[in-house]
Amino acid sequence: MRAALLWILLLGTAAVGGARAASAPWKDGERLKYEIYWGVVIAAEAESRVVREGGYWKAGLELKTVGMVEAFFPMKSSFKGVFGVQTLRARRFEAERQENKNRRSQLILMNPEAKSAAYTDRVSGETVRFALPDEDTQTLLSLLYAARTVPWARGVERTWDVCDRDRLKRVKARCVGEETRFAGKGVKSPKLLVLEAEETANAAGREPNRPLRAKIWVNPQGMVPEAVDLQFIYGTFNLRRVPQRS
């Protein structure tokens, strides 16, 4: 379940490889909040944020279980990342995860120009160095923003490689059309772009054991994901953005 909660945020922003961003669709200091449902139960809450410092974006993501799920499977995760303003190339990724009494602390340092990276387990102290398939390989956090720079329209398809610990995964996404959904009572909703994404074989040709699949609804205004339905081994997670109060 932990992996699915993390990948719903990853797949929920679709995919891009080789991205370049002349101007970002998000604002400096942007915050987005989401509720993650498992059936009718709110299983978790998530909040992302991003600020610009010089030639880099610094992003953060907080994820925690709530309610009944918190009582039986408490989990709290914090992610931090750094990526370039112009190239969106990932430079640094940190993850702190607390599950019951188990703690995980991880660091990935990336040198995209040299196509190399180093993963460190900060609990055990072990470091693993590995090669990147290309200079635009993403991390969990940098991908959340790189995907929003894609000019999505019906038929547009993208793939990308992403570092997950010392492993590489690949996700493919395709825009399949538009829908009008998820508007509150009396609220006029814009047409949302509909994306379908799935985990596929990675750069080494390795097939995922249990591939995850997602359907994503994206608001063209700011390319913000409004909703995600993620299918995984235990059922379906539904992610819904919490509107900001005016």
Image (cartoon, rainbow, N blue to C red):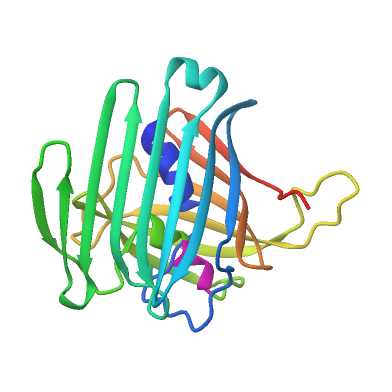
Q: Which quadrant does the N terminus fall into?
A: top left
Q: Is residue 215 left or right of residue 136?
A: right
Q: Is residue 139 left or right of residue 183?
A: left
Residue 215 against residue 234 in the figure, above or below: below
Residue 72, picture quadrant: top left
* Residue 106 placement (x, y as % from top left): 23, 45
Query: From this viewpoint, which residue is outermost toward the right?
Result: 186
Q: Is residue 232 left or right of residue 133?
A: right
Please report the residue visible at 55 percent of the width from the left and 17 percent of the height from the top. 68
Residue 10 inside the magenta-drawn segment: no
Q: Is residue 130 left or right of residue 33?
A: left
* Residue 52 placement (x, y as % from top left): 47, 69
- Residue 26 visible from this viewpoint: yes
Residue 142 against residue 40 in the figure, above or below: below
Query: From this viewpoint, which residue is outermost toward the front?
Result: 53
Q: Nearer the viewer, residue 84 or 148?
A: 84
* Residue 87 placement (x, y as % from top left): 38, 79
Q: Nearer the viewer, residue 218 or 214?
A: 218
* Residue 63 placement (x, y as % from top left): 47, 39
- Residue 13 visible from this viewpoint: no
In the image, the segment drawn in magenta is 145-150
Please report the residue visible at 43 percent of the width from the left and 58 percent of the height from the top. 59
